[in-house]
């Protein structure tokens, strides 16, 4: 069996390292994700359960030339769809298309859907219904350079939906991106951790789960649990995997974890999310200005996602008519970053991981970052910067 775990652009290295750590076979990084191989579905289940950085896990069913709509329909008909669906199973087809002849993703998805229901009608005497919002089985078509790949989505809901985000702050990080930042930045789960601008708390929560070895998917449902073949042996396999994951979790993190924010509403959202994650005893929550942070004790990691500019500016009088940043805003932002840089300089022996969405931040810091890794937070290009504070 061939699998492909998708991830955010720039995080492929983190995902490759993670899947290799799960002892999956044939792990190979590609653009937009990581491929791996196995003889059973257990490997895909394990990836869904344990991966902190993957967005989806796909099981490849077929790969074939598809220069036009007819070839796409004919190729989709060669798949033994009755092995994965019944007449009572709902389905949906997601398509991504990069083709000179098939340019409309909705049309390509429709051709695959037609092939699937035609095959099942011929074999079973009835056809399944389509449910684009909440299907039992989600089929994924990727069409590029006149080659089609058909896969099944094991995840169902995207894997970043852990279930603990009950309150959102401004510009929150996705859980998978936060986990990638911690992995790529080398945040040691055995050492103290601080986020001085925690917002909704995603970095701190992801670090706490890493430190306690809590599988990110242990309390959520997956798409493969609704597949007809799941009932029986596959269900027993997944029950064993989940039980093993829960047994491996530590009762508490090995080092303190602190999450702070200046804004009362953010602190309240942070408290709700930490409670939803079941980590109230593991994360200390404080309200305070990040620039006045003064850490004592054993050094560890300070990781944070500072405002890029738009989140910081709230004075309507400082807005230009064009909606762009004015000189006043620029001065405020540079001053804020200088205050942060001075705070970091005081935390001797700590490692700083910063998500920089604005070049002013790197300019304010003392010295050059030892790591500068390009990532994307949605459509925004950002840089993961790592500094060792002398």
Image (cartoon, rainbow, N blue to C red):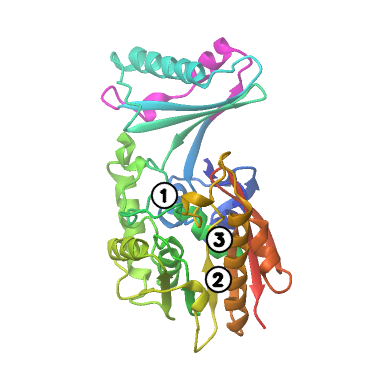
> Relative to residue 82, is residue 33 depicted above or below?
below
Q: Give yes or no for residue 377 being in the magenta stretch.
A: no
Judged from this view, the residue extending furthest toward the left is 88
The x and y percentages for residue 138 are 40, 32
Q: Give yes or no for residue 70 being in the magenta stretch.
A: yes
Q: Which residue is mark 3?
A: 181
Neighbour class for label 3 at 10 Å: few (<14), some, many (≥20)?
many
The tag earlier along the polypeptide, 2 or 1, is 1
Residue 195 visible, this orientation: no
Q: CA distance from mark 1 to mark 3?
A: 24 Å
Q: Viewed as shown, does residue 66 lie left or right of 289?
A: right
Is disc 3 placed on a helix, strand or loop? helix
Q: Which residue is mark 2?
A: 187
Q: Which residue is mark 1?
A: 45
Asked if the residues shown at circle 3 and circle 2 are in contact, with their CB atoms under 8 angstroms apart, the answer is yes
The tag earlier along the polypeptide, 3 or 2, is 3
Judged from this view, the residue extending furthest toward the front is 317
The x and y percentages for residue 389 are 65, 79
Residue 339, picture quadrant: bottom right
Q: Which residues are magenta?
A: 62-89
The x and y percentages for residue 74 are 52, 14
């Amino acid at each position: 069996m061939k699998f492909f775990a998708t991830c955010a652009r720039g995080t492929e290295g983190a995902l490759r390292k993670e899947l290799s750590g799960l002892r999956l076979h044939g792990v190979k990084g590609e653009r937009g994700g990581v491929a791996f191989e196995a003889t059973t579905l257990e490997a895909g289940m394990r990836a869904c359960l344990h991966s902190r950085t993957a967005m989806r896990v796909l099981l490849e069913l077929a790969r074939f030339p598809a220069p036009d709509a007819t070839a796409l329909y004919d190729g989709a008909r060669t798949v033994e769809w009755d092995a994965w669906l019944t007449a009572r199973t709902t389905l949906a087809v997601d398509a991504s298309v990069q083709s000179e002849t098939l340019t409309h993703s909705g049309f390509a998805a429709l051709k695959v859907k037609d092939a699937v229901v035609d095959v099942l009608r011929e074999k079973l005497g009835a056809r399944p219904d389509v449910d684009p919002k909440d299907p039992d089985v989600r089929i994924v078509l990727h069409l590029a350079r006149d080659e089609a790949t058909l896969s099944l989505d094991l995840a169902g809901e995207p894997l970043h939906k852990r279930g603990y985000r009950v309150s959102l702050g401004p510009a929150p990080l996705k859980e998978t991106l936060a986990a990638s930042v911690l992995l790529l930045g080398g945040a040691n789960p055995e050492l103290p951790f601080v986020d001085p601008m925690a917002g909704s708390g995603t970095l701190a929560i992801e670090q706490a789960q890493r430190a306690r070895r809590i599988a990110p998917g242990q309390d959520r449902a997956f798409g493969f649990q609704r597949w007809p073949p799941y009932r029986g042996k596959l269900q027993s396999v997944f029950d064993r995997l989940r039980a093993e994951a829960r047994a491996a979790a530590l009762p508490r993190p090995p080092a303190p974890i602190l999450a702070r924010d200046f804004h009362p509403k953010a602190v309240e959202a942070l408290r709700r999310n930490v409670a939803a994650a079941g980590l109230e005893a593991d994360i200390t929550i404080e309200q305070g200005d990040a620039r006045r942070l003064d850490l004592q004790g054993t050094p560890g990691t300070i990781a944070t996602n500072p405002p890029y500019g738009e989140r910081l500016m709230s004075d309507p009088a400082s807005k230009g008519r064009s909606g762009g940043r004015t000189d006043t805003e620029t001065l405020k932002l540079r001053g804020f970053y200088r205050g942060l840089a001075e705070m970091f300089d005081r935390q001797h022996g700590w490692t700083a991981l910063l998500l920089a969405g604005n070049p002013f931040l790197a300019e304010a810091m003392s010295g050059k970052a030892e790591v500068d890794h390009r990532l994307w937070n949605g459509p925004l290009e950002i840089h993961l910067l790592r500094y060792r504070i002398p």
